[in-house]
Image (cartoon, rainbow, N blue to C red):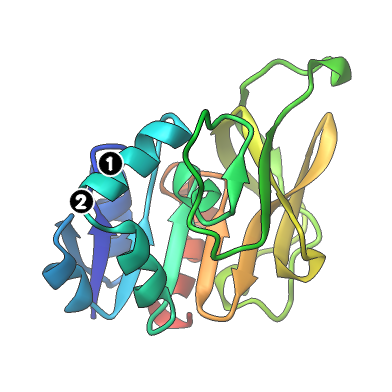
C-alpha cells in the first residue's frame, strides 16, 4: 500500500517515513498532487509555525487539494499537521487552517505554572474504543509531545484521546477517514509504532 507523506518543508519527513515503513507501508515522500493522488493514504506531518505551513501548502497548490483528497482516502495529521486540519489558530497572523475539523488551535496559558512548550513524555487518557487509530492503546500509555498550542474542537465527539498539561486537552482526533494526533508517534517508540500500524492496516 502506497502512503503519501506530504513534503512541504516543515516536517519530520525521515522519521515519519521510516516508522511507516517499519509498519508495512510503502512511503512516497512528495509535494506533487499527482503522486499524492496515486497513493491510498496520506500523512500530513508538520513542525514549525502555522502561518508558514499554510503559505507553503498554498505555494504548492495543496490546500484545497488535501481537502478534496480527505473526502476519498484516509488522512493523518501529525503535530502541526494536525493543527492545520482545524479552522484557525491563535498563532496565525493571517492564515486559516484547512477546516476539515471544526474548532480552533489555542496557546497553553502560563497561569497553570507549566513550562511552555509542552515537551516530553505524557500519559494518554480517554482513549476512544471505536477509533481505528487508537485501537489497542491503553489508558496511561505514554507518547512524546513538543508543542505550545493545542486544539479546541467545536465538536467533542471527534476527540479520540486526551492528555493533561496544566489543562486537560484532546490530543487525538477522528472524524470519518480523517485522523490527527498532537503528539509525535515517530518519537513515541512502541506506542507510536502501534499508532502508525493502525493507520496502515485499519484506518
- Residue 68 is drawn in which quadrant? bottom left
* Nearer-the-camera pick, 157 or 129: 157
Residue 16, horizontal then vertical, whole percent: 32, 50
Write the residue at 42% across / 74% down. 70
What residue did someone put label 2 on?
Answer: 60
SS class of the residue under badge 1? helix
Q: Residue furthest front?
A: 94
Write the residue at 71% across / 15% down. 115
Residue 26, horizontal then vertical, whole percent: 20, 70
* Mark 2 vs 1: CB contact within 8 A: yes
Write the residue at 56% across / 71% down. 133
For the question of whether residue 11 can be seen, the reply is no
In the displayed structure, does residue 31 sit left or right of residue 23? left
SS class of the residue under badge 2? loop
Q: Is residue 95 above or below residue 113?
A: below
Write the residue at 57% across / 31% down. 147
Identify the disc placed on residue 75: none
* Nearer-the-camera pick, 142 or 29: 29
> Where the N terminus falls, by quadrant?
bottom left
In the displayed structure, does residue 26 sit left or right of residue 91? left
Cα distance, mark 2 to mark 1? 6 Å
Q: Is residue 110 above or below residue 130?
A: above
Q: What crowding class fits label 1: few (fewer than 14 Cα within 10 Å), some (14-19), or many (20 or more)?
A: some
What residue did someone put label 1 on?
Answer: 56
Residue 40, horizontal then vertical, whole percent: 28, 80
Residue 64, horizontal then vertical, whole percent: 35, 64
Q: Is residue 118 above or below residue 110?
A: below
Amino acid at each position: 500500500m502506497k502512503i503519501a507523506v506530504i513534503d512541504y518543508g516543515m516536517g519530520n519527513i525521515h522519521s515519519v517515513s521510516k516508522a511507516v515503513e517499519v509498519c508495512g507501508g510503502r512511503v512516497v515522500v512528495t509535494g506533487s498532487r499527482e503522486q499524492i493522488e496515486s497513493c491510498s493514504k496520506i500523512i500530513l506531518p508538520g513542525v514549525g509555525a502555522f502561518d508558514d505551513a499554510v503559505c507553503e501548502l498554498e505555494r504548492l497548490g495543496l490546500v484545497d487539494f488535501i481537502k478534496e483528497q480527505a473526502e476519498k482516502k484516509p488522512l493523518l495529521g501529525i503535530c502541526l499537521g494536525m493543527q492545520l486540519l482545524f479552522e484557525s489558530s491563535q498563532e496565525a497572523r493571517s492564515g486559516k487552517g484547512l477546516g476539515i475539523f471544526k474548532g480552533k488551535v489555542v496557546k497553553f496559558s502560563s497561569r497553570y505554572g507549566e513550562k511552555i512548550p509542552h515537551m516530553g513524555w505524557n500519559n494518554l487518557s480517554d482513549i476512544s474504543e471505536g477509533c481505528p487509530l487508537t485501537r489497542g492503546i491503553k489508558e496511561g500509555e505514554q507518547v512524546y509531545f513538543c508543542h505550545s498550542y493545542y486544539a479546541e474542537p467545536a465538536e467533542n465527539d471527534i476527540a479520540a484521546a486526551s492528555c493533561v498539561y496544566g489543562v486537560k486537552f484532546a490530543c487525538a482526533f477522528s472524524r470519518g477517514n480523517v485522523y490527527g494526533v498532537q503528539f509525535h508517534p515517530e518519537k513515541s517508540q512502541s506506542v507510536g509504532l502501534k499508532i502508525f500500524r493502525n493507520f496502515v492496516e485499519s484506518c
